[in-house]
């Protein structure tokens, strides 16, 4: 499982930017669910947070494998990663939400709702238009 530091430099550079990501989870009935989200980087992994009452949280608790696609300025330039949630914690003080809000908006998040934060380990990755004009994949 590659850590962030082991990815190609161009892939890391895109991930280090505050880009919109699309988070994919699996519902109880096996169908996919996607939602836009913010993300950060921590300990070589992808950092995300959700409200404690978010509809996607039960999906994650039931099946902790997720996928995220981070979009470049050109949406055809993107990095997709997938892997398990390796750490999940209650974040009632919204420390991670505030951290991500500072990254994306330059100020703390104004809403005050308890969150659940998590780290995603990178099992696989692929990109389009970042390393070359075609798709590039991690060794699987």
Image (spheres, grey):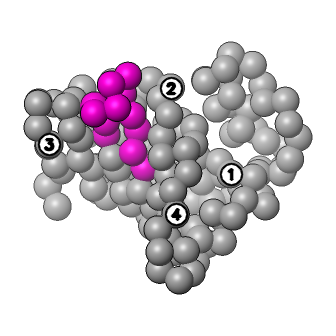
| Up-down relation of residue 77 to residue 65 (above or below) | above
Q: Nearer the viewer, residue 31 or 20?
A: 31
Q: Residue 138: horizontal and vertical position, in percent? A: 18, 50
Please tell me which residue is depicted at 71% across the width and 38% down the height of the picture: 97
Residue matched to label 1: 50
Quadrant housing the N terminus: bottom left
**CA–CA distance in space, label 1 to label 3:** 30 Å
Residue matched to label 2: 18
Q: Report which quarter residue 99 is drawn in.
A: top right
The label nearer to you, 4 versus 3, is 4
Q: Check residue 135 in the rendering and tell me which mark sits there, or answer none.
A: 3
Magenta span of residues: 68-79
Q: Residues within 10 Å of mark 3 (few under 14, many from 20)?
A: some
As drawn, which residue projects farthest toward the top? Answer: 106
**CA–CA distance in space, label 4 to label 3:** 24 Å
Please tell me which residue is depicted at 23% across the width and 41% down the height of the picture: 127
Residue matched to label 4: 33
**CA–CA distance in space, label 1 to label 4:** 14 Å
**CA–CA distance in space, label 3 to label 2:** 22 Å
């Amino acid at each position: 499982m590659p850590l962030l530091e082991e990815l190609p430099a161009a892939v890391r550079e895109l991930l280090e930017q505050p880009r919109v990501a699309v988070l994919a989870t699996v519902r109880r009935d096996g169908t996919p669910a996607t939602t836009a989200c913010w993300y950060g980087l921590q300990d070589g992994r992808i950092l995300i947070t959700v409200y404690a009452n978010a509809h996607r949280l039960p999906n994650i608790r039931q099946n902790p494998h997720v996928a995220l696609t981070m979009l470049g300025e050109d949406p055809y330039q993107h990095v997709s990663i997938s892997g398990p949630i390796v750490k999940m914690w209650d974040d009632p003080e919204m420390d991670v939400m505030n951290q991500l809000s500072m990254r994306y908006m330059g100020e703390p998040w104004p809403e005050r709702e308890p969150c659940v934060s998590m780290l995603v380990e990178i099992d696989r990755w692929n990109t389009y238009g970042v390393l070359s004009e075609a798709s590039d994949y991690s060794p699987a």
